[in-house]
Amino acid sequence: MRRMSLVLIALGAFLIVLGPMVRWYAYPHLAVAPANERTTTGLIATDATVFDVGTLKDITTTLHTKVNTIGDASTPNSHPGLVTYTNSTSTLGSDGTMLSRMVERMTFDARTGESSTTCCNDFISTTEGVETPIVHHGIVANFPFETQKKTYQFWDTTLLKAVPISYRGTTSIQGLKVYKFEQTIPPTEYGTQDVPLSLLGLIGTSNVKAQEMYGVHRTLLVEPNTGVIITRTDDQLNTLDYNGTPRVTLTKAVNNYDAKTIAKNINDYGAQGSRLHLVHSVVPQVSFALGLLMLAAGIFLGRRRPTAAGTRVRELADARS
């Protein structure tokens, strides 16, 4: 009985210590964005309207966008806790014509997803070979590990600033629980162009300054344990405005992650999210509770007095010896 009591007390103490160790030591080492990220994300927008510079008219097409993400493995060595990703984005029309290209380098906290304003040569390039240094703000790639049901600041690449994105409820996609976030940006000027009046459908031959306008309704479905965006929808409208009136539609499209990207995200990050949830919550709680029970049982057994029968057996054994 005494031996069993000591075993229970030892195991109980071990489990009580194990719970906090898993939560506060093991979990922080697991819940970090990988520095050597290598992923490809596909997006598709069917029945999109874009302005064709060749014909100077709007055309309807299907947009195919690929985003290649490469991590800079050297960043954590020089700036512990940070990671740097470079996104190379290209968009093709239905006929395979390259419609746009962009390269963006971003640095953010490996745990919280918050962008860093102190390093590491972040830039954006929309013209081949021309890199414009920028300072990112807010969430730029992933949401925090253990994403909360609240409003975050989410980076918008067109406006080059962070805009609030709000939690709108919990839902599921193909059986995976996700948090839904929504962001609405009303038509906002982000640049100007000198264009002929005729392009705007107006009479005259002179050039005027037209405003480049951009608006979007963005929906993100986020796996909360990893903070990874499983899928996104950008309902976007870009126009050329003159004197407060839209005159030319530059882009009107609803971009979504394609089926292959969504399936891969669910498979990869659904499993990873489950493991992180176990380490963050289930294992520490169960370990601590079980440890308390075993410790209490061990102490209880250790304090029990021997029964009369047990005392008599020991007396007879002592008398024979």
Image (tube, rainbow, N blue to C red):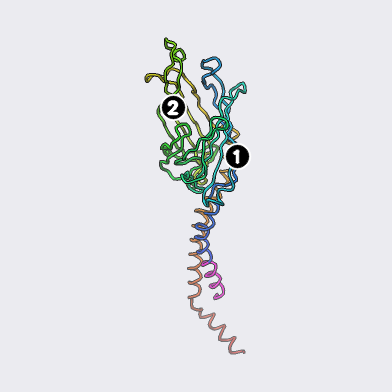
Quarter of the picture holding the N terminus: bottom right
The percent position of residue 219, horizontal first and vertical second, equals 47, 34
Quarter of the picture holding the C terminus: bottom right
The type of residue carrying mark 1 is Thr
Q: Is residue 225 above or below residue 182?
A: below
Residue sitting at x 53%, y 41%: 176
The percent position of residue 253, horizontal first and vertical second, equals 50, 25
**Residue 166 shown left or right of residue 23 in the figure:** left
Between 79 and 298, the residue placed more toward the observer is: 79
Residue sitting at x 44%, y 11%: 205
Between 207 and 172, the residue placed more toward the observer is: 207
- The picture quadrant where one finds residue 102 is top right
For label 2, the SS is strand
Q: Give the magenta-colored segment's residue range.
A: 1-13
The type of residue carrying mark 2 is Gly
**Residue 125 shown left or right of residue 151 in the figure:** right
Q: Is residue 138 above or below residue 1?
A: above
The percent position of residue 296, horizontal first and vertical second, equals 48, 68
Residue sitting at x 54%, y 54%: 29
Instruction: Answer whether residue 303 is magenta in the image.
Output: no
Q: Which mark is residue 191?
A: 2
Q: Which residue is disc 1 drawn over? A: 39
